[in-house]
Amino acid sequence: PSLPGLCRVYGYVYGIDGRPIEGARIEARLPDGVNGASILIVAPFAVETGSDASGYFFVDLIPSAELQPVATDYEITISASGRTLYRKRVTVPSQATLWLVP
C-alpha cells in the first residue's frame, strides 16, 4: 500500500468471453456514513479507481478493525458499461493485501 497501516484491496475484472475489462469503475465506501479510526475522523466519501488493460485494479483502505464501530465493513462495487457487475460488503483485514474474490 501507499501508506503504512493500509490494506491494498485488489482484483481482476474479466468478461464472460475471458477477456479483461479495461476501465471498469471500482468504488469502496463506508455505507454507514462517517466513521472514526483511532484519533481520526474518516469521511464517508467513496474511493474510486478503474481497472487497467489487464483488468487489474487496487484501492488502499484502512483496515476494518481500525474503524469505529469496530469491524465496520466496506461496500465494494464494480461496474462497467453502466451496469453493476459486483457488489459486496467486505471486511478489510489488518494485513498488507486482500485479493478480492467473489
Image (cartoon, rainbow, N blue to C red):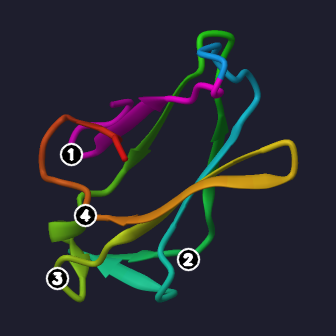
Q: Position of residue 59 (x, y in %)?
A: 47, 40
Foreground mark, 2 or 4, reads: 4
Res 5 label: 1
**Left or right, residue 29 beside residue 39:** right
Measuring from the top left, give residue 98's x and y in whole percent: 25, 39
Can you identify the residue that label 3 sits on? Answer: 70
**Disc 2 vs disc 1: Cβ atoms closer than 8 Å?**
no
Residue 15 screen position, x and y as percent: 65, 27
Query: Could you tell me which quadrant the N terminus lies in?
Result: top left
Q: Residues within 10 Å of mark 2 (few under 14, many from 20)?
A: some
Q: Residue furthest right?
A: 82
94 to 88, vertically: above or below: above
Above or below, comparing residue 81 to residue 61 in the picture: above
For label 2, the residue is 44
Q: CA distance from mark 1 to mark 3?
A: 16 Å
Q: Amino acid at mark 4?
A: Thr
Amino acid type, label 2: Pro
Query: For this rendering, which residue is in front, 57 or 5?
Result: 57
Q: Secondary structure at mark 1?
A: loop
SS at badge 2? loop
Could you tell me the amino acid type at mark 1? Gly
Query: Between marks 3 and 2, how big is the CA–CA gap?
Result: 16 Å
Circles 1 and 4: CB atoms closer than 8 Å: no
68 part of magenta stretch: no
User: Marks 1 and 4, how far apart in space?
Assistant: 15 Å
